[in-house]
Amino acid sequence: MAPAPVICVTHGGGPMPVLNDPSQRDITLSLSTKVPKILKLGTSEAPKAIVLITAHWETEFITISNGSKHDLYYDYGGFPSETYKLKYKAPGSPEVADAVAEALKVAGLKSVMDSKRGWDHGVFIPLLLINPAADIPIVQVSVLRSQSPSELYAVGRALAPLREQNIAIIGSGSASFHHVSSYFDGKVNTPSFQRMQKQWSTTLERAIGITQADQREENLVAWKQWEGSTQIHPRGGTEHFSPLVVCAGAAGDGVAKGWNDVMMGVAMRTFYWD
């Protein structure tokens, strides 16, 4: 059996993808149709577990949800009451959490276990669309508060062997753009922004598209120096890019594939390795 896939998705704005909000239409469709096919859900090759790296949990050391079940953490505000009653009843997996911790330990990386924190919306919103059957164990994993690309890439490298155990790795963030104020002040609709974001995205796709893991790392760890980066992700607020760096590290020497979804006028890239 081939290694389980690595996928980095855009999880959209709060719970809006599961509300069928028109601004999230592309993302909703991709999460519910394209991603399940990559994961081979409903077949004998479906992953035995999913390790999901969420942008909405930053910690000093990588922290791993290790409960046999987890409540949901509705870490958003101002949405309809039904969005605070959503349920996602997939099991957790203490055994897979232990495997994650061991993989990090082997690589010399410290981790912390957390059996109490609920799954945040970076976890349960995409999973409600990807696998509504909720029949695959989930282990939620944080990103680093340091937002260091080299440290995050090392985390991905450490997790890569889990793929040989048929454990899929999903990153959940918004790598192509997450500068929220630019949505509200209309900047994203200006021709100059759209040209800049297109050029920046091309640079990102070239870096991610490097098949040799060491060369990919060399290019990707410098992403904050790319022209336009502070307009794509604000200084000190790059947590929605972090899951992609972890995924790129977990990909090994592999060919990246992907597609663009449009959200609120901005092209959002999903990357995957299968």
Image: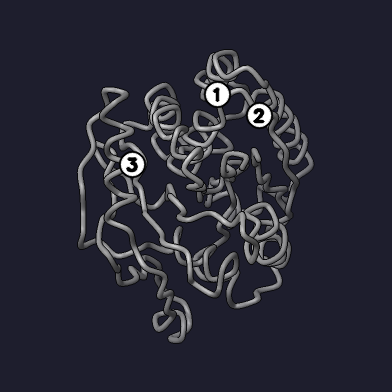
Q: Which mark is residue 100?
A: 3
Which residue in the protein does label 2 denote?
204
Mark 1: which amino acid?
Trp
Residue sitting at x 46%, y 43%: 165
Q: What is the x, y in percent for residue 139?
A: 37, 54
- At label 3, counting other C-alpha atoms closer than 10 Å, the crowd grade (few under 14, some 14-19, many 20 or more) is many
- In three-dimensional space, the C-alpha distance between marks 1 and 3, rounded to whole angstroms, equals 27 Å
Query: Label 1's element?
Result: helix
Q: Nearer the viewer, mark 1 or mark 3?
A: 3
**Marks 2 and 1, how far apart at CA:** 8 Å
In primary-sequence order, the first of circles 1 and 3 is 3
Label 2: state its secondary structure.
helix
The kind of residue on which mark 3 rests is Val
Point out the tag, 2 or 1, that comes first from the N-terminus. 2
User: Closer to us: mark 2 or mark 3?
Assistant: 3
> Tag 3's secondary structure?
helix
Residue at left offset 58%, top offset 17%: 219
Residue at 75% x, 46% y: name it. Answer: 259
Q: Residues within 10 Å of mark 1 (few under 14, many from 20)?
A: some
- Pinpoint residue 145: horizontal percent, then vertical percent: 31, 37
Tell me the kind of residue under disc 2.
Leu
Of the numbered discs 2 and 3, the one sitting upstream in the chain is 3
- Residue at point 62%, 28% (across, down): 228
Q: Which residue is mark 1?
A: 223
Q: Quadrant of the C terminus?
A: top right
